[in-house]
Image: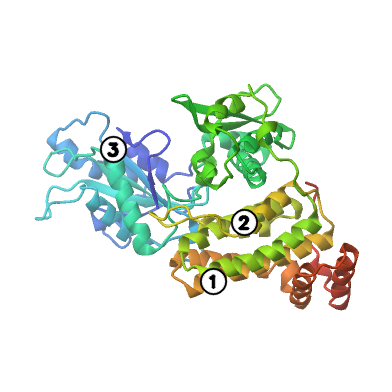
Amino acid sequence: MIAKAPAKGKRGTNTGGLLRYLFGPGKANEHTHPHLVASWDPEWLADGVFAELISRRDGLAKLGRDIDAAMTGHEVEVDGGHVYHVALSVPPADSNAADGFFGDALWRELAEEAVAHMGFGPNSDGMGGCRWVAVHHGLSTEGNDHVHLVINLVRGDGRIANTYRDWPRWRTWCNAVEERLDITRTAPAGEGRKAASRPELKRATTAGATDRELLTQAVSDVMAEAINEAQFVALLDQARVDDAKVLYAPHISGGQVAGYKVALDRGDGSEPLWLAGSSLRRDLSLPRLRARWETPPGAWDQFAVPVWTGEMPTTRFVDNARHNNWRYLRRHLADAETELRQDLADSTEPARWHQAVEHTADLTAVLTRFESPPAQLHRVHGQLARAAQRPRGHRQPSVVAPMLLEATRVAAKCNTPAPLMLAVVVLLLYGILEALDHFAEQHHVRTVARRQIADAWNELRTHPTVETRAGRTVYNTVVDVCSTTNPATRDTERLRRAVAHNPAPAAVPRLRSR
């Protein structure tokens, strides 16, 4: 769960204007069925004596005057604005409702709890509280279920509520809610993305996707292939999204590279929109990337700045002698599944499982580039990325299933495969998800992660390659073939025979050019 201020800030001076916006259509017509889910006065809620007033022409104006009544009566002015506005947001995947929403009852409980935790509620005698409402109006442009809290900071007794260091208090409460409801964990651990800004959404109307989405995919691809920081820089230098070149620049602090930012150069003279790596996805921040890379030879710290700024070539740090053959990838994945099952069998540490899920998510992200349409594997990747979030306090474990990590790097360098080969790789991915799901059920992996890995596995089970009766037979043949030392031609022939004896026209996905 996230508590965040709207783009224009959390403080304002126009209660009625804010209510009109929240009950209006929104900037992208995203405000559907706006209604109150909680209030300081339950008479404003459904079935309350004032509930029907909201639908009238002057209803929101009356609600605004009612919220401001204590401030008006005590003639109090609040420096910086009396309206305190915060949005509480959760991913729709965490909802138990079929339509992706938390539900009004739960949002009311959470809103009332948040108001009490933040000190906006009444005292022990039920007096002196702030006046507030919580408005729900549909999913955000990012697809998150959320409510808006609108609070007048003037208490019933005329005092002004204390908002000093409010964000740490919000963070503490959000963390507690995540633990209690067992929903997706957010910062500091997590994969979550930041919301798209208005400039991004404006560009997306012509580009078909926001810069953030395009750059997230591009940087994810680079991350999957890079074996160290120098190669990451080298690959960023070559990266393109359609016809746009990926620009990058380091953030240098204290003479060291502490982070980076990226943008798209569309070649149309428009100003690039720069985004920090951590704002794309938290696991794309430079500290998180460094935690997963091999350490390059030599004293990298003294070379990082000149490499990032282009003053020093990356070739001395990059090993380009790597396989990029799908047959090699197929063998790697078959070995990776065996290695992963053994690795997880030898350790019951959930952090190692989370890292294995992270590697699998990276592999799935790479494979989405070769399937058309890629929506199904994108959904699998989304569930894996959320399940990969380690619980707070869990340290980064040693490398889990290095063969799986190497397979992802190989896949990132491969060209478009033959349909049969892609089907084989998807089947091997299915076996890896099966192993991860089995571990999650047998060991103490938190409930939400177990649900997410199960959802990913079930999603892949409906993939055309897997759902047919032929899928399992072909999969068993693949594992058998990959575990032998037969010549490559004989391997291919055995696979063709397996498919021929188990015909499944839908089992071979369509390809798209990389």
Drawn side of residue 50 relative to residue 121, left or right: right
The answer to whether the residues at label 1 and label 2 have Cβ atoms under 8 Å apart is no
The kind of secondary structure element at disc 1 is helix
Residue bearing mark 2: 402
Tag nearer the camera, 3 or 2: 2
The kind of secondary structure element at disc 3 is strand
**As rendered, which of 430 and 490 lies closer to the eye?**
490
Residue bearing mark 3: 83
How far from the left and from the top, in percent, is residue 72? 18, 36
**As rendered, which of 497 and 122 lies closer to the eye?**
497
Rendered residue at 74%/55% (across/down)? 373
Circle 3 residues within 10 Å: few <14, some 14–19, many ≥20: many
* Sequence order check, earlier mark of 3 and 2: 3
How far from the left and from the top, in percent, is residue 149? 33, 47
Circle 2 residues within 10 Å: few <14, some 14–19, many ≥20: some
Amino acid at circle 2: Pro
Q: Is 335 drawn above or below residue 207 in the view shown? A: below
* Sequence order check, earlier mark of 3 and 1: 3
Amino acid at circle 3: Val
The kind of secondary structure element at disc 2 is helix
* Sequence order check, earlier mark of 1 and 2: 1
- Residue 430 appears in the picture as rendered: yes
**As rendered, which of 292 and 76 lies closer to the eye?**
292
Q: Label 1, label 2: how many angstroms apart (C-alpha)?
A: 16 Å
Amino acid at circle 1: Ala
- What number is the disc on residue 345? 1
Rendered residue at 63%/54% (across/down)? 405
